[in-house]
Amino acid sequence: MTTVREVMSTDLVTVEPSTMMVEAVRGMSKARVGSVLVLEDGALVGIFTERDVLRAFDQMHADPARVSPMSNAMTQDPLTIAPSATVGEAMDRMLDGGFRHLPVMEGGTLLGIVSMRDLARSISKG
């Protein structure tokens, strides 16, 4: 079985909780990714995704959201997955949780991120 370690991305886009949302969105756009990981003192404290952008703009309206810090809109304490988990386990966790990105952690160390697209690609090649 294919593991998360084999399909995850290690090219991470990270921000701090104090980073303004507009900067995080620029980083996502530049890197052509759908999420950024929010780190505080090197520890994962949240994830900010395309859906969080939409929710922030809907709830806070566009101008206030642009200059609001990540801590106001990120998903705090996101679910994670181990690199040894199978692609099927990661897919189940994403489908059950209704999200498309999972940080990959081993112990307390952030190793990467896996997306629904990564999983779909690995399954279609299988």
Image: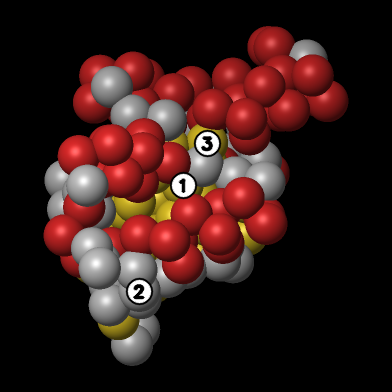
Residue shown at the point (83%, 25%) measured from the top left: 59
Residue shown at the point (28%, 22%) measured from the top left: 32
Q: Residues within 10 Å of mark 2 (few under 14, many from 20)?
A: some
Q: Is residue 98 above or below residue 96?
A: above
Q: Amino acid at mark 3?
A: Thr
Left or right of residue 36: residue 62: right
Q: Amino acid at mark 2?
A: Ala
Image disc number at residue 101 = 1
Q: Secondary structure at mark 2?
A: loop
Q: Quadrant of residue 31?
A: top left
Q: Which residue sits furthest right? A: 59
Q: Secondary structure at mark 3?
A: strand
Q: Is residue 38 above or below residue 78?
A: above
Q: Are marks 1 and 3 in contact (CB under 8 Å)?
A: yes
Image disc number at residue 49 = 3
Q: Nearer the viewer, mark 1 or mark 3?
A: 1
Residue shown at the point (44%, 24%) measured from the top left: 25
Q: Position of residue 21 (x, y in %)?
A: 52, 30
Q: Position of residue 38 (x, y in %)?
A: 44, 53
Q: Which residue sits furthest front? A: 126
Q: Amino acid at mark 1?
A: His
Q: CA distance from mark 2 to mark 1?
A: 15 Å
Residue 118 seen in this snapshot: no
Left or right of residue 107: residue 98: right
Residue 33 seen in this snapshot: yes
Residue at mark 2? 85
Tally of numbered discs: 3
Q: Which residue sits furthest bottom? A: 107
